[in-house]
Amino acid sequence: MNQDILFISDLHISLEKTEITRRFLAFLENQATTASTVYILGDLFDAWIGDDDNTPPNKKIKTQLKRLTDSGTRVYLQQGNRDFLLGPRFCAETGITLLGDYEVIELNGVKTLLTHGDLLCTDDIPYQTFRKKSHTDAWKDNVLSKPILLRLLAARWYRFRSHLHKRKQSQDIMDVNQQTVIDIMKQKGCLRLIHGHTHRPAIHDFKIDEKPAQRFVLADWKKDSAQLLRWNQAGHQTEAI
Ligand SMILES: [Mn+2]
């Protein structure tokens, strides 16, 4: 039995980005079926407006995820800042397991912290303020009670605002805050962190209390490039999809 563990994030699947959807469906049928476990570390979708939205390509993706989990591959998902409304119904329909904002797993005997990454960008104060508000039950209940069409329009508006926000902010503010990274890794007792969100794929080496630590940043998927991070007994490698 293959014990490979695959990590992906930031696919930002949407109706318009047909090539990314195609790549993801191919990934589910190929690499994912030969792995023991797949971790999707957030922003699978460019906008998720509720588990009741079955507009394309959502239904097809749910069906293929279900097929994968039925075949025995475990799939774990963290919410991103774009798809934090992914909930229990989506999990029930696909057989995937939703993880919390911070999850600690063991990879080759090393405690490894998983997170989407937006919580690490603590220099972006307006975003963190919005995040706090939008993660309350009251905010979510209010949004999810609106008709789908209205939510689709609202999502477009948010995406546009987020685009403007990103243009206006300096590059540094949109990246992780190194002190926040160290604080949370110490708090969780981890010397390895894997996250996405920043769209700055890299492996960063640093020290926590004189001990070597590593931060893996997963790549976002684009029309012409997509990546996965593979872990197995031999170690890790980045692969193009
Ligand atoms: Mn993100």
Image (cartoon, helix red, strand yellow):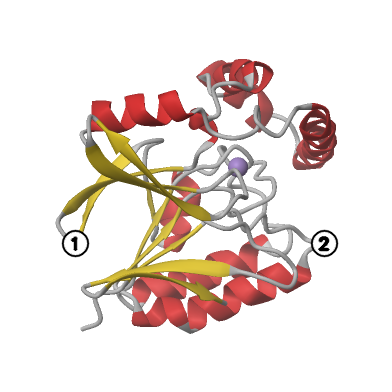
Of the residues shown, which amino acid type is indicated by label 1? Asn
Quarter of the image with the C terminus is: bottom right
**Relative side of 141 to 107, left or right:** right
Where does residue 145 sit, x and y in percent of width and height?
66, 29
Q: State whether residue 81 appears in this view.
A: yes
| SS state under label 1 | loop
Q: Residue 230 or 19: which is nearer the viewer?
A: 230
User: At 79% across and 28% down in the image, what residue appears?
Assistant: 165
Q: Residue furthest front?
A: 210
Q: Within 10 angstroms of label 1, few (less than 14), some, or many (20 or more) residues?
A: few
Q: How far is mark 2 from mark 1, CA to CA?
A: 39 Å
Counting residues from the start of the chain, the first of labels 2 and 1 encountered is 2
Does the residue at mark 2 contact the one at mark 1 (Cβ under 8 Å)?
no
Where does residue 184 sit, x and y in percent of width and height?
34, 28
User: At 44% across and 75% down in the image, what residue appears?
Assistant: 67
- Residue where numbered disc 1 is placed: 108
User: In the drawing, what numbered circle is on residue 16?
Assistant: 2
Q: State whether residue 190 appears in this view.
A: no
